[in-house]
Every structure is written in structure tokens, then in C-alpha cells.
Image (cartoon, rainbow, N blue to C red):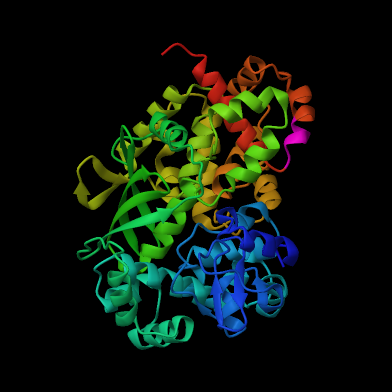
Amino acid sequence: MLIDPEQGYRAVVSRDARFDGQFFLAVRPTGLYCRPSCPSIAPRRRNAEFFPTAAAAQQAGYRACRRCLPDIVPGSPEWDLRGDLAGRAMRLIMDGVVEREGVPGLARRVGYSERHLTRVLTAELGAGPLALARAHRAHTARLLIETTTMSVSDVAIASGFASVRQFNDTIRAVFATTPSELRVAAQRAGRARQTATAGRVTLRLPVRTPFDAAGILAFLTARSIPGVESSRPGRYARTLRLPHGSATAHLRPAGTHLECTLRLADLRDLSTAVSRLRRLFDLDADPAAIDGVLATDPALTSAVALTPGIRVPGSVDGTETVVRALLGQQVSVAAARTATRRLSDAIGEPLPTPEGDLTTLFPSAAAVAERASEILTGPARRVETIRSVCAAIASGDIELHVGVDAEALRSKLQTYAGIGPWTAGYVVMRLLGDPDVLLPQDVALRNGAKILGLPSGMETLAEHSRAWRPWRSYAGMHLWQAAARAIPQ
């Protein structure tokens, strides 16, 4: 159980939207499960049951509430906080691994037997991997049915179902209705639908507020690679390398959601693309918990007040994140961007159908390993590190996915000459969404600490940061922003 039942009931009585997605309320007399902020009258305590996941509620025989739409909420921040087996498995399930590789593939990626994995997930989350994946598919399907004009068959494919029949059976079991009835009910409720064409769909990705959209857009814009990424005020776009093909994504923050338009070569990649973009923009973070802890430090109080809801940018491509980190060692952001652009221009994979400024996929690990030495300039040791690490990624010796154990990845990376604590920590923070990484080796971060009146020495800052746990990654973003504000524009 992820939350105390009494605390959960208090959240339900007060309709506290901060807990939406973090746990689910089930009401025994109605047989429905809801988000904590459901506008319906709160049930009596003896009639309320709490579940850590929607899948667990479904396993217990409950159906999703049609009024509060418990599936159309930000995901639980628990999966970034937890580095244990359950947390790693959930990140992979949301990335679509069960649909692509089955439970055996999921078990292989987390390094345990199928039996042990199922036992742990059932004990921790109330459902096994198949049920958790089924719930994720069902919720994706409902979102597409109610908010787009996609055909039922396209929704089934995009949601990860093996067949339309399986899709229909699941919708009936989870929502006690048919896909057509769900769509009609959404139209009667006045929920707007976005026009969808072949391979192109626009979605509203929910986010917990406050949300520092300007900060994360500024971070991505400063590092954007022409061809791979594109940005203009209030907007960001990029190419994506996905399991079944390429895609482009155009994103625009809009209050309580992120408007996302995807063009996909294969509709089966939709759920994976959404999951990765949610991680890139850190949409599932819990700003109330983060800001509440960081604001207790007098040195950070004003920074938190200035930038509530700060986010830590994530990753959509492990190879790209590692190469960017290596190229960014001990150089400015502008210099790292120039080097990354040179690499992308030379060996990036052209999009089958370019879309405006988006023309190129970031180079694959195999391509970088083969040609890094002839393209990149700078210290020979760094170039060789990039080449050897990418060769290891291409061969599978280094695994880069959201189910990797953080400490194992950190240790593995640091076995390569030229990779120290800063690079390994940066990769873990962005690729895995680890919320508790501080990089005291970073000069800009220490400059920001000094500006805010914090200790600026590596050891003293690291010691002071213990009070910020488990949110040191977010504290680091405040320090970086403080340093950036001090630079004359």
C-alpha cells in the first residue's frame, strides 16, 4: 500500500487533487473506483477501499468511474522515487515493454525470474505484470476514444492491444461499456475531441500544478540540436526514435496540461511516445511535496517562491543522453551543443518524411561508435570514451532503459575511462528520473549555490544538501537557474 488508509480518506473527503494518480479510491456499494478528487459525495469510511494502482482495483472487481475519469490524471510520482524492483518494472510497463516483449522480456530487463517479479508486483501493487499492463492499455484507449476522432481499430492498435476483439473485451471488463458508448458519453459531456488523421494525433497530457513550463522549455531550448529539435517561444518539438519506427512530437504547455501533437510512423508506438515525453517534461512530479521540503531551507525559500513547480528534464533516448553528457564535460552549454550538432549533421538518420525544421533522428549508438573518431574534435581521451561507450551500448553490454538499477548503471558507466561521478550522476538523473541526485562537481551549480548564500565547496554543499533529500535533483535545478539568472543576457 502506498498510502495510509486514514490519510487517503482525508484526501478523499477534502477532494484533494494533489493525490490524483497516486492512489485510487474504490467504493464498495457502487463497485466503482475513482480518483481522490472525484466530485461525487465521499463514501462512508467503512465503504471506502484504497488501492495503489488502477490495476489492483480492477483485479478486485471494481470498474472505472465515468464521472471523474480516474485514468486521465498525471501518473504516480512513486515510480521515479522508487528504485526497487516494483518501481523499475512499472517504468518499463508504462514504456510498453510487456506489449513488445511479454512478461519474459520484462523479467529479463529487471534481472529477475517471471515468478519472482509477479510475486513482488502482486504484493507491492496489488496486481501482476499482465494486469498492470492491461490497465495501462485500457486507460490509454479511453483517453484516445474520448479525446480524439481516431477509429476504434486505430485506437486498439495505438493502445497496444493484440486485436480489436481483445480491445473490446477489455473495455467492457474495465469500464462496463463499449468503446462506442464511451465516445457518445464523452460527446454528451461536452469533452472536446481532437481531429486525428493517419499516424497523426493530438493529445492533452495532464500535469500536476504548479508547473514551471518556462524553466524546462528554457533548458531544452538552450541545448536543442537543429534538425533533431526545434523551439520557439512557448513551444518545443523534436524527433523520436521509437521501437517500431520514427516520430515527431510538437509540445505546448497550456495550464493544467501539455498539448502534444504526434506524427507516428507506426501507431503501436503512441503509448511509448507519450510515456517518454511525460518523462522528458517530468509531468508526474509532485510539486507540493518537492516545494514543501526545499522551501524549509532558508537559502532556497525565495528560489522556490520565484519558481514553484520546478521540473527536472528527463530523457527520450538513452544513447542521446549519454553522448550529450560526455560532450558536455567541462565545456559550456553552447560548446556542447555545437559538438552535438556536428555529430548529428554528419551521421544522424534522416527522417523518412521531414516535417518543417525536424529532419533528423539523433545518431544511433552503432553509428557513433563507428564514426565518432573522424567527426568529433577535442581531447582524444573524450572522443575515445564516447566511441567505446557507444560500442558497449550497441552491443548490449550497457543497457539504457528506465528499468535499469540506478546504482548498477552508475557503477557500470564509471568503469569507462573518462567517466566520473558528474557524468554518471547526470545520466542517472535524466534517464531514470532519479529525484535525489546532486552534482556538486558542476561549476555552474556551485556558482548558483554561492549566489543563494549556500556553501559552494563540493564537500560542504554535498553535506548541506542532505536536508533536501529525497529531492536533491530539484534543488540542483534551482541552483542552475540561479546561476543562469546571474549571467547578463
Indicate the quadrant where residue 5 lies.
bottom right
Looking at the image, residue 386 lies above or below residue 335: below
- x then y, percent, for residue 34: 54, 70
Q: Residue at x 67, y 37 (%)?
A: 472
Q: Residue at x 21, y 62 (%)?
A: 195
Q: Main secondary structure of the magenta part?
A: helix
Residue 231 shown left or right of residue 421 in the figure: left
Q: Is residue 4 visible?
A: no
Q: In front: 7, or 118?
A: 7
Looking at the image, residue 170 lies above or below residue 351: below
All told, the count of numbered labels is 0
Is 70 magenta? The answer is no
Residue 487 shown left or right of residue 477 in the figure: left
Q: In front: 131, or 459?
A: 131
Is 466 magenta? The answer is yes
Q: Which quadrant does the C terminus fall into?
A: top left
- x then y, percent, for residue 83: 68, 55
- x then y, percent, for residue 347: 33, 42
Give, as a single range, the part of the protein colored magenta.
465-469
Q: Residue at x 37, y 64 (%)?
A: 269
Query: Which residue is the extreme one toward the top?
Result: 488
Looking at the image, residue 34 lies above or below residue 488: below
Q: Is residue 18 visible?
A: yes
Looking at the image, residue 378 lies above or below residue 49: above
Q: In front: 100, or 297?
A: 297
Q: Which quadrant does the N terminus fall into?
A: bottom right
Q: In front: 182, or 113?
A: 182
Indicate the quadrant where residue 371 lies.
top left
- x then y, percent, for residue 45: 70, 72
Residue 27 shown left or right of residue 255 in the figure: right
